[in-house]
Image (spheres, rainbow, N blue to C red):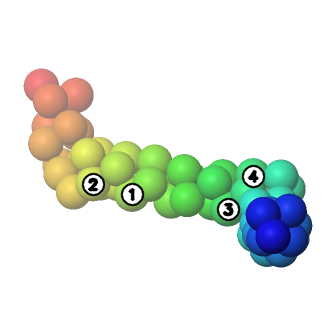
Amino acid sequence: MNQKQSSSRDSGVSLVWDPQSMNIMIAHELAAVIISRFWYLYGVRPSVYEHHDST
C-alpha cells in the first residue's frame, strides 16, 4: 500500500518537481523579485539619486 502511494506521488512530484522546470521557474521568480526590488528601490525616486550625483 505504501509503495503504491509512494510511486503515485513520485510520479506526480517528478512532473512538477523537474530539475530543469524548477530551475526555470526559480530563475524566473528570482529575476522578477530582484528586478521588482531594484525598480522599487532605484526606479521610484531616480530624481533623488540624480540630484545627489549632480550636487
> x and y percent of residue 21 in the render?
80, 62
Residue 20 horizontal side relative to residue 27, left or right: right
Label 1 Cα neighbours within 10 Å, binned few <14 / some 14-19 / many ≥20:
few
Q: Which residue is drawn at 15% across and 30% down?
A: 52
Q: Judging from the image, what secondary structure is the residue with disc 4 in?
A: helix
- Note whether 37 is above or below 8 in the view shown: above
Q: Which of marks 1 and 4 precedes in the sequence?
A: 4
* Residue with the mark numbered 4: 23
Disc ID at residue 40? 2
Residue 11 occupies quadrant: bottom right
Instruction: Give the CA distance from mark 4 to mark 2.
Output: 25 Å
* Residue with the mark numbered 3: 25
Q: Which of marks 2 and 4 precedes in the sequence?
A: 4
Instruction: Give the CA distance from mark 3 to mark 1.
Output: 16 Å
Residue 7 horizontal side relative to residue 40, left or right: right
The answer, for residue 14, to whether it is visible in the render is no
- Contact (CB < 8 A) between labels 1 and 2? yes
For this orientation, the residue located farthest to the front is: 1
- Note whether 18 is above or below 50 in the view shown: below
- Contact (CB < 8 A) between labels 4 and 1? no
Label 3 Cα neighbours within 10 Å, binned few <14 / some 14-19 / many ≥20:
few
* Residue with the mark numbered 1: 36
Residue type pointed to by label 2: Tyr
Residue type pointed to by label 3: Met
